[in-house]
Amino acid sequence: MNAVMMAISPLIFICLTVIGVMLSIAWRRNHTLSAILTAVGLNVALLLLLFGWPLGTVDVTDLLVVDDLSRFGGVLILVATLACVTLAHHYLEGYEGPRDEFYLLLASAAAGGLVLVSARHMATLFFGIELLSMPLFGMLAYTFRDRGALESGIKYMVLSAAATAFLLFGMALLYAVTGTLAFTALGEALATHGSDPWLLAGAGLMLVGLAFKLSIVPFHLWTPDVYQGGPGPATTFLATASKVAVFLVLLRLFQSALALHEGWWHDLLGFVALVTMLVGNLLALTQSDLKRLLGYSSIAHFGYLLVALVVNDGLAVETVGIYLVTYVLTTLGAFGVVTLVSSPYTATGGTADASPLHHYRGLFWRRPYLTAVMAVAMLSLAGIPFTAGFIGKFYIIAVGVEASRWWLVGGVVLGSAIGLYYYLRVMVTLFLLEPGMQRRDATHDWAERAGGMVVLGVTTLVILLGLYPTPMIDWVHWVASGS
C-alpha cells in the first residue's frame, strides 16, 4: 500500500494543489499568491516524481500503472506546466478580469496529463484525455474579450468534442467484440482476430480521435487557428504538455497492439507519417504569422515522431523519448519568447498576442538576448548541429535507417530541408531594420522575471544538450529499457 501511495503521490499532490488554490481564491483573490501556490505544488510533485520511491513498475490498479515511461512523461508534463505558470504570471498582469482561475485550469490539465501517461485501460485513457482537454477549453478562451481567443476556445471545444465522439465509438466497438478495455487484452484480441471488421473499425476510430489531439494530417486543420488565437501561456501548454501526454499513451497502445504493425495497418501509418511531415512543412512556408507558423511546425514534428511508431523496434522507444525532450525544451523557448513579447496582456481588437511576424522585425536591436533565445529555438526546430533538435532528428533518421524504411527517411530529410527555409526566414526578420510598421516589444525587465529566467534556462539546456547529449541519452535509454 505504501508503494502504491508513493507511486501516485505526484498526482495526489497536484489535486491537493488545485484544492489549495481554490480555497485561497475563496478566501481572498491574490494573483501572485495563486501563481506561487501553483508553482510550489508543481515543484513538490516534480520532486516526488524524480526522487520518490519505489522505482520500477507499480501496478496501482487494473486501470493505472506507474512505470519508467509514465514517470518520464510526468517529468516533461510538470516541467512544461511550471514554465507555463511562470509565463502566465507576467502575461495576466495586464488582464482586467479574474486571473486566479487560470492556474486552477492549468493544474487540472496537468493532472489529466499525469493520468493519461499512466493509463493502461480505456477508462483511464478517456478520463485522462478529458481532464486534460476540458481545462484547455477555458484556458484558450480565457481572455474572451478578444475575438481571437474566444474563437480559439470554441473551435478547440467543438472539434475536441467530435474527436471524443470518435474515441468513444471506437472504444464501444472494441468492447463489443472483445469484452475488455484493457490495453494488453485488446492487443491480444487484435493479434488473434485482427481481420474482424468491427475490431478494425474500433481501432481505426480510436486512432482518429487520438490523431486529432496530435494534429496528425488530415485531422490538423484546427491547429494554426487555435494556436494563433489562444493566449500565449495556454498555447504553450497545448503545444508541449498536452501533445506529450497524448503521444505517450499512443506509444503505450502501439506497444500493446503489435498487430497494428503488420500488413496494411503498418503501411497506412507510414503513409500518414510521410504526409503529415510534408504537409506541415509545406503549409508553414506561406505563413506570415509566427504562431500559425509554429502550429504547422508542430504538425510536421509529430509526423517525424510517427516514424518511430511505424518502426516500433530497436531504438524506437528511445527515439521517442529523446525527440520529445528536445521538442518540449525547444517549443518552450519559442513560445516563451512569443508570450514574453505579448506580456503583459493588452486588450486590443482581434488577438492581443504578438502573433504577426512583422511584430518581431528588428527585435535584435531592441532585445538582443531575447532574440538569441528565439534564434536558438529556430535552429533547434530546424535540426541544426550543436542544438538539441539535431540530436532528436539524428535519432529519427537513425531509427528509419535501422529499419530500412528509406522512403520515410527521405521524407524526414525533405521535410527538414523545407523547414529550414521558414525557420531561417523568422531569424532574418529578427535582424532586419525596423520600418514604420507596427511592432511589439518585451518589457525591459523580462529577464528578471520568472518567465524570462525559465526561457533563458531552457535555451541554455537546448545548447548544452546539443553539445553534450550523454545525460539525456542515458536517462532515456534507462526509461526505454524498463518500458
Image (cartoon, helix red, strand yellow):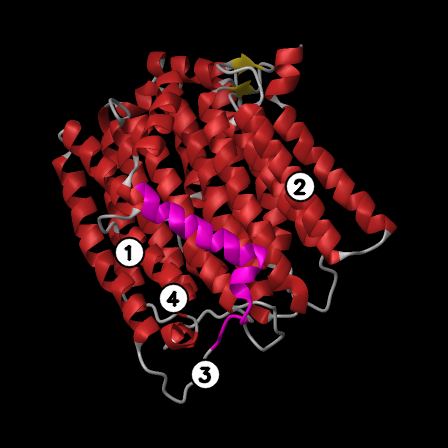
Q: Position of residue 24 (x, y in %)?
A: 81, 47
Rendered view: 362 above or below 66:
below
- Measure the alpha-carbon separation of dots 4 and 2: 30 Å
The three-letter code of the residue at mark 1 reads Leu
Q: Earlier in the sequence, mark 4 or mark 2?
A: 2
Q: From mark 1 to mark 2, how far is it between C-alphas? A: 33 Å
Graded by Cα atoms within 10 Å as few (under 14), some (14 to 19) or many (20 or more), the crowding at tag 2 reads some
Q: Is residue 226 above or below residue 9?
A: below
Instruction: For marks 3 and 1, give the CA distance.
Output: 26 Å
Give me the residue at 42% from left, 45% from top.
Answer: 328
Q: Which mark is residue 40?
A: 2
Answer whether labels 1 and 2 touch (C-beta < 8 Å): no
Q: How many residues crowd mark 1 within 10 Å: few (<14), some (14–19), many (20+)?
A: many
Residue to which mark 3 is pinned: 438
Quadrant in which the C terminus is drawn: top left
The residue lying toward the viewer, choosing from 37 and 352, is 37
Instruction: Say the numbered circle drawn on residue 177.
Output: none
In the displayed structure, would residue 367 be above or below residue 292? below
Count the marks: 4
Q: Which region of the structure is painted magenta?
A: 440-465
Distance CA(mark 1)–CA(mark 4): 12 Å
The verdict on residue 328 being magenta is no
Which comes before the other along the chain, label 3 or label 4?
4
Name which residue lies at 60% across and 57% down.
Answer: 88
Q: Which residue is mark 1?
A: 379
Mark closer to the chain start, 1 or 4: 4
Figure quadrant of residue 480 = top left
| Residue 219 in view in this figure | no
Give the structural element (helix, strand or loop) at label 4: helix
